[in-house]
Image (tube, rainbow, N blue to C red):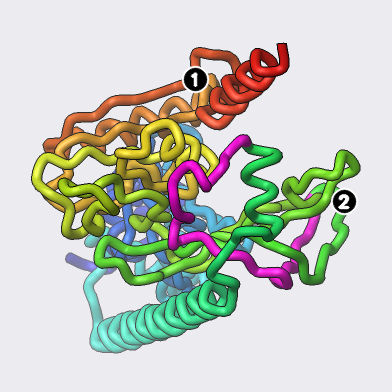
Amino acid sequence: MTDRPHLHSLADIKAMLNDQVHRVAYHYAPPAKGSYEDKGLYFTLNPGRADRSVGSFWVTLKPGKWQGHWKDAATGHGGDLLDLIQLAMGLSPADALREARQFLGLVNETPADRARREKAMAASAARAQEAERRAAEDLARRKDQALGIYLSARERIAGTPVQAYLRDSRAIDLAALGSQPRALRYQPKCYFKQIDTETGECFEGEGPAMVAAVSSISGETVAVHRTWLALGADGKWGKAPLPQPRKALGPFGGASIRLRSGIGPQGGKGAPLNKCPAGSHVFISEGIEDALSCAILLPEARVLAAISLGNMGGVKLPRNVAKVTLIADRDPGPEQQAALKHAVSQYQKQGRRVAVWQNSMGGKDLNDALMGVTTQKDGDDGQ
């Protein structure tokens, strides 16, 4: 084909690129580990920088006003498909336009064009490799840091603020279980540094915290969850007045906090999760307090905490788990309802039976129900 760029205006080029938006997006912002499409948006790594994780960069594929536009929430930058070509290949605007014409088959590729293309793609591949290397190093660092926090914490929580918090503020008496969950520990001086996004105030220091090990399906500690505690005006231990009194450190996706392994066939503790018997039933909650409430009410149950609603459907389970009961908050929000529905479908796709428990006794969650029952029992005992 002859080189006749004067036949196509800038608007024509952009329109033709939009007509092939999927092909353009996947060519200049190629799929990476974790890439996905959701509601007409294509999420992948930013091809113009050493982007380490999918989530902040996307291209709009669906028809409409924003079709073909990309956005990087991490940097605030964005543009159209011609800008994407310029970003991905590190070109000037004029060279990006020539690259677009070439991509659309409107001009012939010269040896100089080919050399420029190969150089740009090599640079892009190098950026991707660097991002992958840095991501792996960061992952290893966070896992080591999380394990260090857990191992440095006190193993026994009897007589500590953790026991007082669970018993007095959450109606969870671990003595009823016979022994404390091994995943829980007490750290009297747990470091925190948090920013209040509304006021800009910085909170930094050390404070007592309930520390929980987050384990992969194999049992490896891959992250740690911390709940900072403080003594309230009522003399009870509660969550500390921090912007985020609960925080996880480390890659907890697919992992969970193992709080109860149930009861074995001859009594005593049940088998570890990855060695559970065929046909096992697992209860999964979002938070630690709901999981412990379940363990108090059903000591024979195997109970896990997923840490977040988004991870409730992503916890990796062995094949021997036949049924999953999700202990869900009673939250009417559309995003929360959609996340719960997604969690149910994930386990159903794995061939497992799924049930959902939500509090119908007043309150938001299972721990609210437990506290209500305990309060009523204490009132009856006092009469």
Q: Is mark 2 on a helix, strand or loop?
A: loop
Q: Which residues make up the magenta segment?
A: 171-197
Residue 238 visible to an observer of this rendering: yes
Q: Which residue is drawn at 36% across and 44% down?
A: 303
Q: In which quarter of the image is the N terminus?
A: bottom left
Could you say whether the residue bearing mark 1 is in a helix, strand or loop?
A: loop
Amino acid of disc 2:
Thr
Residue at the image position 43 percent from the left and 31 percent from the top: 297
In the rendering, at what x and y percent does residue 99 appear? Answer: 35, 69
Quarter of image, res 44:
bottom left
- Residue 369 placement (x, y as % from top left): 55, 23
Q: Name the residue under label 2.
A: 199
Tell me the quarter of the picture where residue 26 sits: bottom left
Is 90 rendered above or below residue 193? below
Image side of residue 158 versus residue 68, left or right = right
Give amino acid for label 1: Asn
Q: Residue 359 carries which label?
A: 1
Residue 161 horizontal/vertical position (percent): 71, 56
